[in-house]
Structures are given as structure tokens and as C-alpha cells.
Amino acid sequence: MLSAMATLGYLFAVEDYVTRPGSPVYYLGISSLVRDVQVPDGAQGREYFGSVGDGNKPAQSQLSFKVPPATADAVWDEMTRQLQDLTLRSVSTGGESPLVSSNKHTVSPGLREAQYTAEKHGLVLLTTYEDSDGGTSSIRFEITHFD
């Protein structure tokens, strides 16, 4: 109990944090929805980010990872299936391919974005970005849950 209280105190003191699976911050600070997302085989650079929110900025949990460009479409389809399996529904204007623009693009333009929602889960964004590490091209996926 004391450890859980100390972890909660830490979360509110730092506001934004990066964590790893298995740590107290991971279990108390990252939403179960994001923890339940399975990272695809071959993904690199898995990172969990969280924020307790501040003022009009909502609390959020995020999983990001990178894949080779040749696998990005298949990984997009797998992430879409996983989110739908979690009873999320697309809040898209684009039919089967839920590509949606939002004000998030004014900060860091993404390649693709889909918005999902469910009554008990709030808003979830699935977004991809071009990335490059030392000249090696990759596609970064972000699953962000605003709760």
C-alpha cells in the first residue's frame, strides 16, 4: 500500500513520465487499454509514455514502437483489429479506412491517423509517423488513450 501511494505521489509530481512494463508506474500510470495492446513481432523501440494531464490537457497513456516501412500496412491492419476487439468503434469520416485529421497534426504531421472511442474508454488515437534512426527509415506507431 505504501509503495502504491508513493507511486501515485510520483505521478502527480512529475506530470509526464516514461515507464517500462512491470514497474509500479507502468501499472498505476498506464491505462489497462494501452497495456493490453500487443506489440507486433519485429517491432523495435517499444516505449510507454503517460501524463496525468494539466489544466485543459487530458490525462493520457501511450504506447509507441517502430516497424520497417514494408510491414507498416500489415501492422496498421493488426492494430486496427486489436482496437476493434477492445470494443472501440471508429469515429472516422472515412468508411473502412478511418483516416481523420485533427489538431494533433499541427504539432507533428502523421502519415495516418484513426480515432476510436468507447463509452468506458474515452478517445483512442492510432497514428503513424515517418522516422529515421541513423539513416534507417522506419514507421513509428503511436496508440494514445486519452482518459
Image: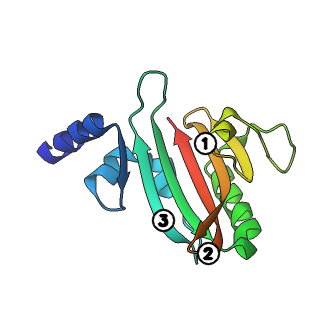
Provide residue 98's location: percent of width, then percent of height. Answer: 79, 46
Q: Furthest residue to the left?
A: 2
Provide residue 46's location: percent of width, then percent of height. Answer: 48, 65
Q: Give the vertical position of 63 relative to 72 (above or below).
A: above
User: Would you say residue 101 is visible in this rendering?
Assistant: yes
Question: Residue placed at 62% from the left, 75% from the top?
Answer: 135
- What's under tag 2, amino acid-wise? Gly
Which residue, given by chain and number where applicable, does mark 2 sit on? Answer: 135
Q: Which secondary structure, mark 3?
A: strand
Which residue, given by chain and number where applicable, does mark 3 sit on? Answer: 46
Place residue 54 in its image quadrant.
top left
Place residue 12 in its image quadrant.
top left
> In the visual, does 133 lie left or right of 111?
left
Which residue, given by chain and number where applicable, does mark 1 sit on? Answer: 124
- What's under tag 1, amino acid-wise? Val
- What's under tag 3, amino acid-wise? Arg
> In the visual, does 113 lie left or right of 95?
left
Question: Residue placed at 35% from the left, 61% from the top?
Answer: 20
Q: How many angstroms separate mark 2 from mark 1 (CA)?
A: 31 Å
Q: Give the mark nearest the N terminus, 2 or 1.
A: 1
- Within 10 angstroms of label 3, few (less than 14), some, or many (20 or more) residues? some
Depth check, front residue: 67 or 108: 108
User: Would you say residue 37 is visible in this rendering?
Assistant: no
Q: Which secondary structure, mark 1?
A: strand
Q: Are marks 2 and 1 in contact (CB under 8 Å)?
A: no
Q: Give the vertical position of 109 relative to 45 (above or below).
A: above
Depth check, front residue: 145 or 33: 145
Q: Furthest residue to the top?
A: 55
Q: Furthest residue to the right?
A: 95
Q: How many angstroms separate mark 3 from mark 2 (CA)?
A: 19 Å
